[in-house]
Image (tube, rainbow, N blue to C red):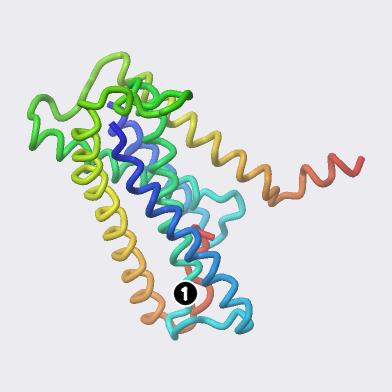
Amino acid sequence: MACFLVPMGEAIVTTVVQKVVENREKKVGGKRTDNAGLKWSQRLSWLNKLLWGGTILLALEHVWHGEVVPWPPFLTAMENPADVAPMLHEMATFGVAMAITVTFVWAIIVMVAELKAKAMPEAKGNLISGGE
Amino acid sequence: MWLIMTSLAAVITTAIWYVRAPEDKYKLGLLSLIFWGATLMWFVDHVMAYLTEGGEFFEINPDATLLGLSVIILALLVWEIVLLVSDPKGVLKRVLKR
């Protein structure tokens, strides 16, 4: 119904956080935030790409299934008051589960990348450029 | 079906990204993260729907296949727009300078 709105909300928040962190890192002269060689803005950019990518593709699926329309109120579930409660329930269950899973997987990716970077001191600062 | 197709796209894109890593001139890292984000979300959606509502785990029919193709096309489109805007080869700059 509208489960993708929850990861989208998270994506908006993390995008703002990434911009703030980026500015802060620029102010301190682009110094790394820790010894592992990964900047926080870089880590957050991976999460943003996962969240925005998923949100955009899921939005298409919802349009395909007629759950999202290009005219107000945009969500077909909103047209019928009886559908609003199930929609909110779906967002609270499916949507939250999606957001938590993506964030959890991102945390694992960051952890693995940090461990790899720490294991190879010569590779510091030259880690995975894939997300930037 | 769209979950299978997106997963396949994610796996293939990640493999191509890895072959070229650490260089990522063409932003394949972005493309693979787009596919992985959607794959994870649809996986959770499928598992939860299967557990709560039952029925078939994968929807395999022409409509679902067409949706899978559309999803891949949209992801490629987003990636290409980002690629053209960032223009890592400077192609657009050179064309516009002419």
Position of A15 with respect to B8 (left or right) is right
Q: Give percent across and percent down for residue B36.
A: 36, 46
Q: Residue at x 60, y 72 (%)?
A: A23
Q: Residue at x 41, y 80 (%)?
A: A120
Q: Quadrant of the N terminus of chain A?
A: top left
* Location of residue A31 (image quadrant): bottom right
* Location of residue A89 (image quadrant): top left
Is A38 or A120 nearer to us in this picture? A38
- Image height of A106 relative to B35, above or below: below
Q: Quadrant of the C terminus of chain A?
A: bottom right
Position of A131 with respect to A3 (left or right) is right
Q: Residue at x 32, y 69 (%)?
A: A112
* Location of residue A5 (image quadrant): top left
Work out which residue is located at the far top of the displayed protein and give it: B62
> Given the image, what chain letter belongs to the residue carrying mark 1?
A
Dot 1: what SS?
A: loop
Is B82 or B95 nearer to us in this picture? B82
- Image height of B61 relative to A132, above or below: above
Is A131 or A78 nearer to us in this picture? A78
Residue, disc 1: A38
Work out which residue is located at the far front of the displayed protein and give it: A81
Q: Give percent across and percent down for residue B6.
A: 35, 35
